[in-house]
C-alpha cells in the first residue's frame, strides 16, 4: 500500500519535527521526496533531509530543470503532505500561487493533499488564515487542526503541530484510500440546516443550525462517488457542487421532501435540525395592540426520522437510515445513555450523537461525535473537522450497506 509521498516542509520552528514524520513515513515503506521551502532550510538543512530520505532534496524550481520537477513531483505523488504548514504557506496555497517548488507541486498534485498547520495562536486564529483554511478544505485538501499546548516562546495556545505519529497515521490513511470511490452507485439523500416555522406571513420560529455538517456529509459523499440529493432548510453555508438541491423551509415541507426521496434512495441521513414544535400560523401579520405581548401556542410537528423508519417497515430493499442526536449531557456516560435511548426511540440504523452544550457545535468547523449502531456497536470520533466526521459516518454506512 504505502506509496510515493512528497513531504513539503514550510518555514516554521516545527520543521524539526518533520524529521520524525519523514522517519515514520519511510519506516512504513513510503518513498518520500522532501520539498522544503527556502525558509524551512533556515531551520533544518538540506543535508538532513537528504540523509533521512535517502534522496537528493529538491529545493527550487531551477534545479534539474530538464526533469521538469515542478510538474513531475506533484503528478507522480500518491500523496502530498505539508508539515508544518505555516500561515504563509496556507495563504499561498489557498491563492494558487506558484512562486516556489512546493507551491508548484501543490498545483500539479493529482492525489490527495494533507496539511498540518503550525504557527502562533494569533496567526492561526486570524480571519485571513481561517478563511484560507476554509478555502483549502472546500477544495478537498485535508487540513488538520493544530494541537493546543506550548508554543515557541513561553506562551501556549492553539497552533502546535499535531504529534508526528498522528500526522503519519493520517497520511497512511489517505494513502490507503486515495480515490475514495467506495460509495459509487449509491443514491443518498441528506437533510441539512434548520427549519423555519411561520407564525404569521413575516415572522418565524427558527433554530441555530448552520447546515455545515449536512453540507460536509453531502460533499464528502459526492467525492466518494455517490449520487446525492441535499434537502436543504435554512443554512449559513452554500450547498456543495455536484448535488441536487431541494430547498425547503418548514418541518412539514422537509417531511414531504424526505418521504418522496425515500422511495429512490439507498441511504437517508437526517442531519437537519427539524423543529419539534410549530406555532399555529396566523394568515395576516399580527399587529401590536397597546402594550400587550402575544401568546404563541406551539403544536408538535411530525418526527420525520421516526416516520421514515415506520414507513420503511421491514422491507429488505429499504434505505439505510441515519439520524443525528443533539444532546446537552453532563458527561460522556450521560451522552451515551441519552444517545442509546434516542436510537431505540427512533429505530434508525445509525445515530450520530453530539453534545450541543456550549458553543462547540453550531456554526463551528469541528465537531466530536459518537456513532451508535442498532446492533449495540459504538464508535467515538474525537474532535475533527466536520468533513472528517462526515467521512467517519460514511465509513460506518459503507460497512453496513450492500453496494450496487
Ligand atoms: N428529527 C426529525 N423530526 C423532528 C425532530 C427531529 O426527523 N421533528 C430528527 C433530527 O433530524 C435528528 C433526530 O431526529 O436526526 C434527533 O433530533 P434531536 O433534535 O436530537 O431529537 P428530538 O427528536 O428533537 O428529541 P428531543 O428533543 O427529545 O431530544
Image: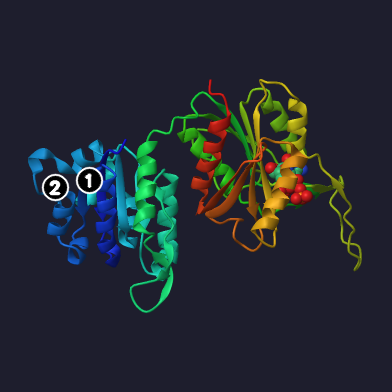
Q: Secondary structure at mark 1?
A: strand
The residue beneath circle 1 is 32
Give residue 104's mark: none
Give SS at disc 2: loop
Q: Which mark is residue 55?
A: 2
Q: Horizontally, is 29 left or right of 369 in the view?
A: left
Q: Is residue 202 visible?
A: no
Q: Are marks 1 and 2 in contact (CB under 8 Å)?
A: yes
| Position in image of residue 207 (x %, y %) | 71, 53
From the top left corner, tell me how far across and down residue 349 is, in percent.
66, 35
Give the left or right position of residue 228, taking residue 5 as reference: right
Place of residue 331 in the rendered image (x, y in percent of width and height, measured from the top left): 66, 61
Residue drawn at 70 percent across, 32 percent down: 257
Image height check: is 313 above or below 307? above
Asked whether the viewer can see residue 262, the reply is yes
Residue drawn at x 84%, y 51% is: 285
Q: Residues within 10 Å of mark 2 (few under 14, many from 20)?
A: some
Q: Is mark 1 within 8 Å of ligand 1?
A: no
30 shown above or below 100: above
Q: Quadrant of residue 215?
A: top right
- On the image, the x and y values in percent for residue 340 come to 71, 46
Q: Quadrant of the N terminus?
A: top left
374 over 148 or under it: above or below: above
Give the mark nearest the N terminus, 1 or 2.
1
Amino acid at each position: 500500500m504505502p506509496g510515493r509521498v512528497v513531504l513539503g516542509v514550510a518555514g516554521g520552528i516545527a520543521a524539526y519535527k518533520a524529521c520524525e514524520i519523514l522517519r515514520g513515513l519511510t519506516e512504513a515503506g513510503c518513498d518520500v521526496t522532501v520539498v522544503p521551502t527556502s525558509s524551512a532550510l533556515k531551520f533544518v538543512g538540506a543535508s538532513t533531509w537528504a540523509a533521512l530520505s535517502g534522496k537528493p532534496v529538491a529545493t527550487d524550481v531551477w534545479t534539474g530543470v530538464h526533469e521538469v520537477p515542478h510538474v513531475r513531483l506533484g503528478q507522480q505523488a500518491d500523496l502530498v503532505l505539508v508539515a508544518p504548514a505555516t500561515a504563509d504557506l496556507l495563504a499561498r496555497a489557498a491563492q494558487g500561487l506558484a512562486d516556489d517548488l512546493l507551491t508548484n507541486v501543490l498545483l500539479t498534485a493529482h492525489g490527495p493533499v494533507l496539511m498540518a498547520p503550525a504557527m502562533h495562536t494569533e496567526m492561526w486564529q486570524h480571519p485571513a488564515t481561517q478563511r484560507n483554511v476554509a478555502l483549502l478544505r472546500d477544495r478537498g485538501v485535508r487540513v488538520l487542526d493544530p494541537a493546543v499546548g506550548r508554543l515557541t516562546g513561553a506562551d501556549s495556545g492553539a497552533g502546535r503541530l499535531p504529534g508526528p505519529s498522528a500526522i503519519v497515521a493520517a497520511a497512511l490513511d489517505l494513502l490507503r484510500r486515495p480515490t475514495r470511490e467506495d460509495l459509487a452507485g449509491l443514491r443518498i439523500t441528506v437533510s441539512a440546516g434548520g427549519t423555519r416555522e411561520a407564525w404569521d406571513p413575516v415572522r418565524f420560529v427558527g433554530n441555530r443550525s448552520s447546515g455545515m455538517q449536512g453540507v460536509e456529509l453531502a460533499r464528502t459523499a459526492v467525492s466518494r462517488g455517490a449520487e446525492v440529493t441535499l434537502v436543504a432548510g435554512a443554512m449559513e453555508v452554500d450547498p456543495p457542487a455536484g448535488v441536487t438541491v431541494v430547498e425547503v423551509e418548514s418541518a412539514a415541507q422537509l417531511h414531504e421532501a424526505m418521504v418522496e426521496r425515500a422511495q429512490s434512495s439507498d441511504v437517508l441521513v437526517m442531519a437537519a435540525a427539524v423543529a419539534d414544535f410549530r406555532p399555529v400560523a396566523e394568515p395576516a401579520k399580527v399587529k401590536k395592540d397597546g402594550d400587550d405581548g402575544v401568546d404563541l401556542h406551539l403544536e408538535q410537528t411530525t418526527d420525520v426520522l421516526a416516520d421514515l423508519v415506520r414507513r420503511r417497515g421491514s422491507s429488505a430493499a429499504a434505505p439505510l437510515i441515519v439520524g443525528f442526536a443533539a444532546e446537552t449531557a453532563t458527561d460522556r456516560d450521560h451522552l451515551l445513555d441519552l444517545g442509546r435511548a434516542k436510537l431505540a426511540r427512533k429505530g434508525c440504523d445509525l445515530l450520530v450523537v453530539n453534545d450541543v452544550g456550549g458553543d462547540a457545535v453550531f456554526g463551528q468547523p469541528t465537531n466530536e461525535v459518537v456513532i451508535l449502531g442498532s446492533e449495540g456497536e459504538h464508535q467515538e470520533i474525537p474532535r475533527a473537522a466536520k468533513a472528517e466526521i462526515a467521512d467517519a459516518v460514511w465509513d460506518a454506512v459503507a460497512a453496513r450497506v450492500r453496494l450496487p
